[in-house]
Image: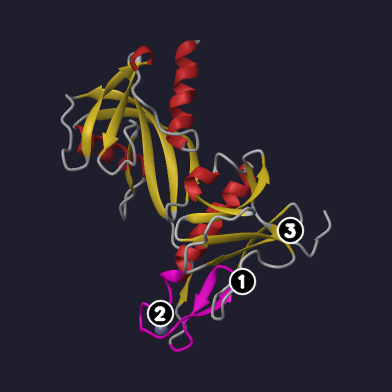
């Protein structure tokens, strides 16, 4: 595909993304040769990727943008509902790069202001330290017991839905060890037959979710009260409110529903 002079512009104010109204309640990433919102001095414009022959550029604004006839601000999570998947994913990457940029202004070794050298690399002009966007890896696990699955409600969930046990990978452990540890810590249960399901970038703010399937192996549910407000096994006829479609957790639950229906 030929490169055009037009760019797709990913403009963020905090977690909110600027979208152009297309009528009929549909939205799109603003596209054009010039940026949709004035870029202030000292603002870094980041090159994120290319999509459909267009450069994807991202920058942050420091003030909220008021809704107009042409533009609206929509949360990154909610933008999943309005954008083609590839555009949502590029927006996620843009959000991660902007987060990284804000949090790597100074060298963590010597305190000197960092200089951006490549789209995903900064170097300290004093000591030569190089930094790249860091990714936090977290696991998700769908635990099966007979015709039911383990669903929990974590206190930090934004909403009433129930989801899969999840947790961050710790230094020095394998993903499977992390799965077994998180289930044990959060619910007191043992699991077996831990197998890989899939993974998903999770730009909130800079994560990778890795999903696993496991089978119940023993123990009684004893919830880690500081993290979880509820947790139990649910059959397909008795499911609580589930996470939204954009999440890997929901994809895994939907996969199990399909399997258990056969
Ligand atoms: Zn340094």
Label for residue 106?
2
Whether tag 3 and tag 1 are in contact, CB under 8 A, the answer is no
Residue beneath the point at 44% across and 84% down? 113
Mark 3 lies on residue: 54
Task: Work out whether 237 lies above or below 42.
Answer: above
Whether tag 2 and tag 1 are in contact, CB under 8 A, the answer is no
Whether tag 2 and tag 3 are in contact, CB under 8 A, the answer is no
Mark 1 lies on residue: 38
Q: Main secondary structure of the magenta part?
A: loop
User: Which one is in front, 155 or 257?
Assistant: 155
* Disc 2 to disc 3, C-alpha distance: 32 Å
Residue beneath the point at 18% across and 26% down? 221
- The segment highlighted magenta reads 102-126
**Mark 3 Cα shell of 10 Å, populated few (<14), some (14-19), many (≥20):** some
* Disc 2 to disc 1, C-alpha distance: 26 Å
Q: Judging from the image, what secondary structure is the residue with disc 2 in? A: loop
């Amino acid at each position: 595909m030929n490169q055009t002079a037009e760019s797709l512009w990913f403009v963020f104010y905090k977690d909110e993304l600027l979208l152009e109204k297309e009528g009929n309640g549909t939205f799109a990433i603003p596209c054009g040769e010039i940026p949709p919102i004035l870029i202030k001095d000292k603002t870094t414009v980041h090159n994120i990727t290319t999509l459909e022959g267009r450069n994807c550029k991202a920058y942050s604004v420091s003030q909220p943008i008021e809704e107009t006839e042409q533009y609206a601000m929509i949360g990154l999570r909610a933008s999943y509902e309005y954008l083609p998947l590839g555009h949502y994913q590029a927006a996620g990457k843009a959000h991660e790069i902007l987060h990284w940029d804000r949090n790597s202004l100074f060298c963590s070794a010597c305190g000197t202001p960092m200089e951006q050298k490549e789209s995903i690399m900064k170097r300290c002009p004093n000591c030569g330290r190089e930094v790249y966007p860091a990714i936090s890896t977290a696991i998700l696990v769908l635990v099966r017991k007979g015709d039911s699955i383990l669903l929990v409600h974590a206190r930090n969930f934004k909403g009433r839905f129930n989801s899969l046990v999840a947790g961050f990978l710790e230094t020095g452990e394998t993903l499977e060890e992390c799965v077994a540890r998180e289930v044990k810590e959060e619910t007191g249960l043992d699991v077996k037959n831990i197998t890989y399901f899939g993974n998903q970038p999770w730009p909130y703010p800079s994560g990778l979710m890795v999903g696993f399937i496991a089978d119940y192996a023993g123990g009684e549910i004893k919830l880690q009260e500081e993290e979880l407000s509820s947790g139990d096994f649910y059959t397909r006829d008795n499911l609580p409110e589930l996470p939204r479609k954009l999440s890997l957790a929901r994809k895994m639950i939907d996969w199990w529903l399909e399997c258990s229906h056969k």
